[in-house]
C-alpha cells in the first residue's frame, strides 16, 4: 500500500480537485506541468542552491540530551526553526516561486491567516522581484499587525478581505476570485498541503527536503536512516508531510501527528480536525473537516494561529482513516507548558504550533532505545506576547 498521491490526485478516498469550472484552466496548467518542471535539472539546481544559501539548509538534526533524559528515550530535533523567516514555510514558497517563473508568471497572489505564509510569500517575491498581492481578513490584519508590517516592508500589497467573518476563509475566497480574473499571468501560492490537486502533492514534495535530510543526518548519528517515530504538529499538514515523506511507505517508522485540541476536544473550541471531522469538501479538496450535522464548516479554535484550520490535508486524512498515522490532540494548556519546558531544558523557544508536538511526551511513553525525531517547525519569537501573557512573565 502506498500513502503517496495516486495518478488521479487522491490519497485513498481523499484529495482530488473539486473546483469551479472557471478555475479549471489554472489548476490544469499546474497539474500538467509541475512534475516535469520540478524534475528538470535546472530547476533542481536552483531550488537546492537557494535552500542552501538563502534558507540556510540543511537545518541541523540536534540530539536533545536533557529532554531525552527527562522522558527516557532518544529525542532528536529537526531544526526548521533555523530556516530564514523562522519556520519551514519558506521551503514551499521558494519551490513555488521558481515553478511560477518557469511557467512565465509575473504576478503572485496568496492568502494568509496568521500572516506567516504571507510573510514567506512576500519574502520570495522580494527575492525574485515579482509583484506580490496578499489577501488577508480585515480582522486578521488587526490581530497580526507585526506580520502585516513585515509584508509591507518586503514590498507586498496586503488587501483586506471585508466579507463574511473577515478571516482566513474570506481571504481565500478573494484570492480565488483574483486567480479566476487573472488566469494567464498570475500564480497562486498555497501555503500548506491543502487545496485542489496538485497542490497537496506539490507542497509535500517541496517540503520533503526535511525527511531527506533527516535520513542522511540520522545515518551519520545513529548508523541507520530510519527513526522509530517521526512527530510533527499538523495545521494544514505541510511541515508534517515534509517530515514523514520519505518514511510514509516504510511501516517500521511510526508516524505521529499532533493536532490542536484547543480548550478540549469536546468543548466546541478546538481544531482537532481528524478526530472530530467528517468527509467533506474544503478549498477544492475532499478531506476530513469539522462541520455541523448539515455540513456547515465549524469555526476552529486554537491558541496557535497556525493550527487554527477547520480541515486537514488529504494525505493526513488518509493517514488517519487508514490507521497508518497515530493522531494525538493536545490542549492549549499542555502545549504552552511544553513550550516553556523546551525553552528551559534545551534553550530553544518554539512556536506555539510546534509546542503541541512536544506535549505528547508527558502521556505517550516511548522505549528507552527508541529514536524519536520531532520536527521543530518554527521558532517562538512571533509568539512571545502570547507566552508572556499566558505565564505572566
Ligand atoms: C504554519 C505553521 C504550522 C502549521 O502549518 P502546517 O502546514 O501544518 O505545517 C506549524 N508550525 C509553524 C511554526 C507554522 O508557522
Image (cartoon, rainbow, N blue to C red):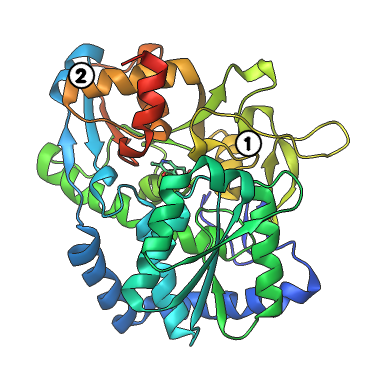
Task: Please state if 71 lies on the left or on the right of 282 as rendered.
Answer: left
Going from N to C along the chain, the mark reached first, 2 or 1, is: 1
Quick one: 199 or 348, which is closer to the camera? 348
Task: Please state if 347 lies on the left or on the right of 273 as rendered.
Answer: left
Quick one: 368 or 134, which is closer to the camera? 134
Quick one: 18 or 3, which is closer to the camera? 18
Q: Quadrant of ligand 1?
A: top left
Q: Which residue is mark 2?
A: 344
SS for callout 1: helix
Position of 369 relative to 155 (above/below): above
| Residue depicted at x 31% and y 53% | 85
Q: Which residue is mark 1?
A: 321
SS for callout 2: helix
Residue 336, by quadrant, is top left
Position of 90 relative to 48 (above/below): above
Q: Position of residue 167 (x, y in %)?
A: 64, 46
| Residue depicted at x 46% and y 46% | 145
Mark 2 neighbour class, 10 Å CA radius: few under 14, some 14 to 19, many 20 or more: few
Q: Position of residue 232 (x, y in %)?
A: 40, 36
Q: Is residue 336 visible?
A: yes
Position of 38 relative to 118 (above/below): below
Q: Is residue 369 visible?
A: no
The C terminus sits in image quarter: top left
Amino acid at each position: 500500500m502506498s500513502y503517496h498521491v495516486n495518478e488521479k490526485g487522491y490519497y485513498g478516498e481523499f484529495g482530488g480537485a473539486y473546483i469551479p469550472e472557471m478555475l479549471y484552466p489554472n489548476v490544469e496548467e499546474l497539474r500538467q506541468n509541475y512534475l516535469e518542471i520540478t524534475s528538470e535539472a535546472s530547476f533542481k539546481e536552483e531550488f537546492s542552491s537557494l535552500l542552501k544559501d538563502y534558507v540556510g539548509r540543511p537545518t541541523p538534526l540536534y540530539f536533545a540530551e536533557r529532554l531525552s533524559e527527562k522522558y527516557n528515550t532518544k529525542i532528536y530535533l529537526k531544526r526548521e526553526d533555523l530556516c530564514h523567516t523562522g519556520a519551514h514555510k519558506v521551503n514551499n514558497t521558494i519551490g513555488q516561486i521558481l515553478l511560477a517563473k518557469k511557467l512565465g508568471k509575473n504576478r503572485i497572489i496568496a492568502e494568509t491567516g496568521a500572516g506567516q505564509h504571507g510573510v514567506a510569500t512576500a519574502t520570495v517575491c522580494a527575492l525574485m522581484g515579482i509583484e506580490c498581492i496578499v489577501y488577508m481578513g480585515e480582522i486578521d490584519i488587526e490581530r497580526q499587525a507585526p506580520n502585516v508590517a513585515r509584508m509591507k516592508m518586503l514590498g507586498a500589497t496586503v488587501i483586506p478581505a471585508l466579507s463574511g467573518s473577515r478571516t482566513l476563509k474570506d481571504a481565500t475566497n478573494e484570492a480565488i476570485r483574483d486567480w479566476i480574473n487573472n488566469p494567464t499571468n498570475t500564480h497562486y501560492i498555497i501555503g500548506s498541503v491543502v487545496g485542489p490537486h496538485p497542490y497537496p502533492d506539490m507542497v509535500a514534495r517541496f517540503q520533503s527536503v526535511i525527511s531527506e535530510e533527516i535520513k542522511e543526518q540520522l545515518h551519520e548519528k545513529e548508523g541507520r536512516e530510519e527513526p522509530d517515530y517521526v512527530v510533527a504538529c499538523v495545521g494544514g499538514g505541510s511541515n508534517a508531510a515534509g517530515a514523514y515523506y520519505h518514511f510514509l511507505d516504510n511501516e517500521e517508522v511510526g508516524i505521529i501527528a499532533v493536532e490542536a485540541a484547543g480548550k478540549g476536544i469536546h468543548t466546541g473550541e478546538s481544531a482537532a480536525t481528524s478526530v472530530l471531522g467528517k468527509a467533506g469538501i474544503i478549498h477544492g479538496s475532499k478531506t476530513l473537516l469539522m462541520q455541523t450535522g448539515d455540513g456547515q464548516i465549524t469555526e476552529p479554535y486554537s491558541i496557535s494561529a497556525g493550527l487554527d484550520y477547520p480541515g486537514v490535508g488529504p494525505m493526513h486524512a488518509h493517514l488517519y482513516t487508514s490507521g497508518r498515522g497515530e493522531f494525538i490532540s493536545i490542549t492549549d494548556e499542555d502545549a504552552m507548558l511544553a513550550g516553556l519546558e523546551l525553552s528551559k531544558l534545551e534553550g530553544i523557544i518554539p512556536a506555539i504550533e510546534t509546542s503541541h508536538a512536544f506535549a505528547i511526551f508527558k502521556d505517550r511513553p516511548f522505549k528507552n532505545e527508541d529514536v524519536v525525531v520531532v520536527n521543530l517547525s518554527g521558532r517562538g519569537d512571533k509568539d512571545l506576547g502570547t507566552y508572556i501573557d499566558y505565564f505572566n512573565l
